[in-house]
Amino acid sequence: MRKMEKGARHRNNTEKNHPGGSESEAGPESGSGGGGVALKKEIGLVSACGIIVVLLTWVNCASVRWATRVQDIFTAGKLLALALIIIMGVVQICKGEYFWLEPKNAFENFQEPDIGLIALAFLQGSFAYGGWNFLNYVTEELVDPYKNLPRAIFISIPLVTFVYVFANVAYVTAMSPQELLASNAVAVTFGEKLLGVMAWIMPISVALSTFGGVNGSLFTSSRLFFAGAREGHLPSVLAMIHVKRCTPIPALLFTCISTLLMLVTSDMYTLINYVGFINYLFYGVTIAGQIVLRWKKPNIPRPIKINLLFPIIYLLFWAFLLIFSLWSEPVVCGIGLAIMLTGVPVYFLGVYWQHKPKCFNNFIESLTLVSQKMCVVVYPEMEAGLGKEEINGDTEEQRRPIYQPTASKDKDSEQPQP
């Protein structure tokens, strides 16, 4: 067993240090042929991902109900697949296949412990649990959000934690740590080992899970752009909805374009590090702001209120995560920070700079008008309970009709007919 483990470790290290070793040893002709096949596969994969993103964007633009039905169906399919994995793991344990679950094997170090790599592992692992924050983006579309939002979070976080932890326990009953690291799709490899002729279930389940995840991200992230535009931090057209379907089509199209741009990189783990680092940076700043507001403005209305102990604990974990992730991967985290800072000049140009040239304002108005005509969108009506003092000039201007009759025609129409 020890020799097999050492051999597996040696192979993994060799593949990491020389990822193209097998092709180079086979000769230049086979290497070029293999490279061409790999390029075609990558192009096909990126094209398929792009088609899926566009298709799901169309579904979200067409109907909110369709989008939620798609989400419900694929979430249910994902949970059923995970339930099958957990049941198979229990069967494996009952058969005595729990070698890697024994403490002496489970906690064996395969490399020197590094606190920076531990923080990076937390950063990548937490990506799977990132859905807890997306519920906040769709608060306005919830029925009785002050009751249902905390309830959804309290139910979903323990459920997701239970399912994911026990799914990983099931994986190690059939796969060694080396096999887990070498596999591009762990569930697929797990199914190939245990399901036999029914192994096709797992690739389909993984695809459906990814499909549902992309749909959920499009649904929630577009509402984030919608809210930002309504606050004046993004172009006003992103805060408009379709006149009949009531879907934020411009915000959804903006989300779709942003998602397609992310397909430029094929390194999924680097992309997760970019997104994870930036997300947790903003999570920490937001929670720190909550603590400051609790101290400086203790009497403002708080429909959802929690004990300050929880955000303080989160901030301590947040500081550990970001500091040591930056220490472990300074280049990746630095690029993530650079991507984030590209928004600073855009903020000063679009939001902070109030007295813009007339030609610039005319261009923005023309662009907004064209976008409204193409997407058939208008600014949504404000709630009746909002006072006039709560509506700023920009919002008042956005609420005006796209086309207004001229004053002369109005006066002529008001004159009595002879």
Image (cartoon, rainbow, N blue to C red):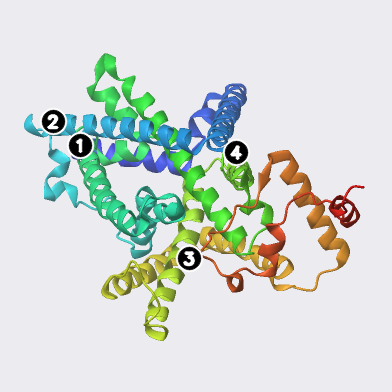
Dividing the picture into quadrants, the one containing residue 75 is: top left
| Residue found at x 78% / y 50% | 367
Report how far apart the C-alphas of labels 4 and 2 lie in the structure: 54 Å
Which percent across, then down, holds residue 38? 56, 27
Q: Nearer the viewer, mark 4 or mark 2?
A: 4
Q: Secondary structure at mark 3?
A: helix
Kindly identify which residue carries mark 4: 244
- Is disc 3 surrounded by few (<14), some (14 to 19) or many (20+) residues within 10 Å? few
Whole-Å distance between the Cαs marked 2 and 3? 42 Å
Quadrant (top left/top right/bottom left/bottom right) for the N terminus: top left
Q: Quadrant of residue 57?
A: top right
Residue 223: % across, % down = 52, 51
Q: Amino acid at mark 1?
A: Ala
Which residue position holds label 1? 170
Residue type for callout 4: Lys
Q: Earlier in the sequence, mark 2 or mark 1?
A: 2
Residue at numbered disc 2: 92
Q: Nearer the viewer, residue 327 or 398?
A: 398
Instruction: Please determine whether, in this image, residue 28 is positioned above or below residue 269.
Output: above
For numbered disc 1, what is the local secondary structure? helix
Q: State if disc 4 and disc 1 touch (CB < 8 Å).
A: no
